[in-house]
Image (cartoon, coloured by chain):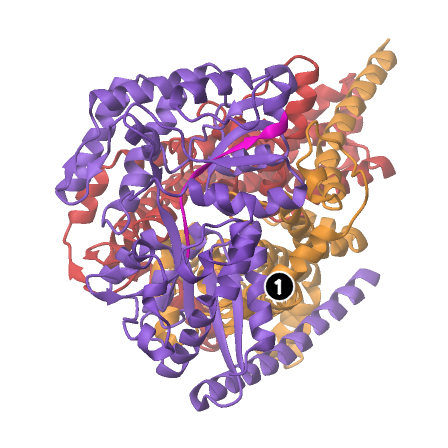
Amino acid sequence: MKKKHRKKLHIGGNIILFVVALLVFVPLVWLIVSSFKTDADVIKYPPAFLPEQWVLTQYKYVSEAIPVFSMLKNTVVFAGSVTIVSLIIDSLAAFAFARMEFRGKKVLFTVILMTMMVPFQIIMIPLYIEEYKLGILDTLLGLILPRASGAYGIYMLTSFFSRIPKSIEEAARIDGLNNFQIYHKIVIPLSKPALITLGIYHFMNNWNDLLYPMILTNSVENRTLSAGLAILVGSNSIKYGPTLAATVISIMPLLLLFLFGQRFFIEGTATGGDKE
Amino acid sequence: MKKQGKIKVKYQNTAYLFILPSMLILTVFVFVPLIAAFVISFLNMDLYMSDISLAGFDNFIKMFHDERMWGATKNTLIFTFAEVPLQVGVALLITMLMQRNTKFHKFLRASFYIPYVCSMTAISILWSMLLNSNSGMLAYLLKKIGVVMPNLLSDAHYAMAVVILVTVWRNFGYTLTILTAATLDIPNSLYEAADLDGATGWKKFIYITIPSIKQTIGFCIVTTFILAFQAFDQIYVLTGGGPQHKTETLVSYIYDRGFRTEHDLGYASAISVYLFIIIAVITIVMRRYLNREEQK
Amino acid sequence: MKWKKICSMLLVCATTMSLFAGCGNSQTQESSEGSDSAGSDETILSLWTVFTGSDGDVLREIIDDYNETNEDGITVQVDIMDNDTLQSKLPSAISTGTAPSFVLVGIEYLQEYVENDSLEDISDFWEATGTNEDNYYENVVAKSYVGDKLYGVPMQYNLQYLYYNKDLFEAAGLDPDAPPATFEELEECAKALTDPDKGQYGLALPTDFGYYVQYLWGNGGDVINTSTNENLLNSDQNVETLTWLQELAQAGVSPEGLTSAEADTMFQSGQMAMTIAGPWNINILNDLGMNYGITAMPAGSDGAYSAEGGCSYMIPKGTDEATKEAVYKFMAYWLTDDVLKEWSMQNGFPVWSYSLLEDEDIKSNDILNSVSEASSIGRDWHLGYEYGSQIDNDVMAPMMESILSGGDVKTELQSASDRLDEILAQ
């Protein structure tokens, strides 16, 4: 009796899973497939799922309309640099918060945590003016610097670092290692999973970010992919075909990275959760 | 971090060296702008940044008479309090269905993660095309079976729901991954004990799994909440805040007033300050609550 | 383990790339700056514009052509963005000195820019480039003047036109050569051309269409008297017109909650029999091989009116003399008959240069002829009026949105009129 019931549940569950999987896949496949349609095909009524003939017109159009490769390069530089620099800076700070005692620690940590809740839109206007005064507006440096350290990174690494057993640290101290050596030779190697998790998080978020790069860059040479595409197609795009192609171009690099390293994305995300 | 060593605590001044770079960055690019936002909210200042003058409380007074601002506050709350439970709920449901760590389930988990890898911008563009009621695929298929789909994104009744659902569609895989990982860490012995009691899968999930991953669920709720409060990209692309400002949240309203129309930086900053206060209050309440939970 | 290795490799790649990119960037910036100030070999001009439609392709072609052929070493780099983005970026770019060399935007923004002191006075343009101002329609050129100072060089001029699909007319038993000329005929045709089963609609009534004022004008109504700031919105004529529009919408001639961009697309795919829009659709309709016609905005009880529009090249404040000089050269190039001809021929924009009117190709172009014919009913819709965009965004748009979705006409008109009063009281 019970076994049967369980089996039914099992089948029912799998049906739900199958439906959800379809809901996830079909739109994505539609997007990719449709980007190979001709102009007339895209707006054809009644619509067809598959292109009548597969063409690269839309991609050609997009690559002529905007400097896709330079934007791609900017995005890699921006997301890559933010990831690396912020990992270094945040882990240094996190080490201090997790393993050292100093005056004002609690207050500082709370204040940093508070900034996690501050949406970019709140500081967007002054940040813009400030970057202008500093002369880094509309430069890649101006995109990277404000993101070079962040509350989330400090918070996550602090909680990870503080779970490293005290005994390991004490042993190192007996060996005569100073704080920086402990950070560098012991804590960092032990925290690789956390660093990878955070690295992916930063890379993905900055890659996909829209408003931040859109506000802080003006010239097309410094524009990132997400912002470039959003600017090209706008909120009410007129040309469906190129919009489709542009969208595919913007998601492809991360998607490929994910397909080849998915275990690594997923394990990264998974380790993110049990840090609380 | 034990309290008992109070006398022994030796302050290490090198710690300041460790936090220096990050403090520098945070000060220049977060704290200073935050304070500046407060200052600007008391000024008459537009995007051209000429003729700046003192406004006193004018911007705030104007704000309290601004219907759009109240609408945006309401929409922000609706969005957050609908999106967060939905996203975590959907993820929990699917976690329940995927408790076996089989190859098939691993594959599905990876698949559900794919939308999250794509930017919200891209996902929103994709859905706005699919949902188009005139030339879109979905409307056509529905029509075939006799259902007339309204133009969801420009219909005041449905637009917010669509924005919420699209957000959930993109993000649930992320929450799912975190939750599943936590369930896999639950020791098998707990389930075995339940098996002896004859509990079914569904009951086991409620009485064993959920309590065991309570903290992780809490983590998911908090992080989702933070992001939901800042939701911008999907609204910008899907509806632009319309129809009739029904999907306009506070952050999109700030953008609209400050950058898109009117270019009124002073007024936009006043709304920013207001938003900041709301967020601060919610954060404090939430921290209190979480702390109490932890102490239980 | 494997993933860790790949990860570290990726990170290393990213760092090195960032280093290289850093160097590359600073170099290119220096070199372009150098040439700017020296004004010798190469001048790179950046141009921001809003031509996201198919006319943008023609614009790019013309500019590419110019880049290759001009002998002054000028390269114009076009950056096409949607209007919202451009309008949000330009003011801040001007105030922070990161503005492009010149912009190409709708003339309705000219006034606002000038008020905020963000445009260069280019009154010496005609003389400096030896361009004959009198060769161009006065009403077109006048729109780039504020007072007696010139702030823009006209790039195109247009009204709103009624596009109709001849195939659908024929299929519905209507005469494809007799498009509707009055509101009554428009209504008849719209209803006759609507066929919900086929997903076919008669007339596009997009909620975000910016020129519903044309219908109001047609029956003798108006929104505002821009010279006296008098609010003319709440009138019996407007109630009548808007009720009529609402009934049309409720009769199902247009899908609910339609946007202008969708209306264009539906016309292209043959789902929409008639739509009112600017000339920027002509190029893509020709490309798609549509069998369509263009005619003037139909007339109401008071006559036929169509809202004027256009785009001008403008130079942001703070642009240095050398750059300005180079921009002048390009603008003068645009005003040559060859370029204007290509623009009109490919996009169907009406001709506004007297010398070009004599051109044989222009004279024999059917679409252009109907466009020119339909271009005599232009009327100024708050161009250069300081509250113009506010009226569009805060008065007209919400009012039309509510009325088209079934709100009570009199109430909506009253509340729109109140909002207009508020704006005028500022």
- Dividing the picture into quarters, in which one does residue B204 lie? top right
Seen in the picture, residue C4 relative to C202 is either above or below; the reply is: below
Q: Does the magenta run of residues contain C302?
A: no
> Is residue C374 placed above or below C122 in the rendered structure?
above
- Residue under the image location 75 percent in, 23 percent down: A16
Chain name for mark 1? A
Kindly report the secondary structure that dominates the magenta region of the rendered protein: strand
Element marked by disc 1: helix
Q: Nearer the viewer, residue C409 or B23?
A: C409
Confirm whether the magenta stretch covers residue C165.
yes
Chain A shade in the render: orange
- Which image quarter: residue B97? top right
Q: Give the magenta range.
A: C156-167
In the picture, which quadrant includes the N terminus of chain C? bottom right
Left or right, residue B190 beside residue C164? right
Viewer-side residue, A262 vs A104:
A262
| The C terminus of chain C lies in quadrant | top left
- Quadrant of the rendered image containing residue C201: top right
Give the image location of residue A165, x and y in percent.
64, 61
Q: Chain B hue?
A: red
- Residue C75: tell me if it is visible: yes
Label 1: which residue? A166
Q: Is residue B293 left or right of residue C170?
A: left
Q: Is residue C418 left or right of residue B3?
A: left
Q: Is residue A269 above or below residue A79?
A: above
Residue A47 location, x and y as percent?
Answer: 71, 30
- Image coordinates for residue C277, horizontal then vertical, percent: 46, 39
Residue in the image at 30% along x and 57% along y: C138
Q: Amino acid under label 1?
A: Lys
Q: Residue furthest top?
A: A1
- In the displayed structure, does residue B210 sit left or right of residue C386? right
The chain drawn purple is chain what?
A: C
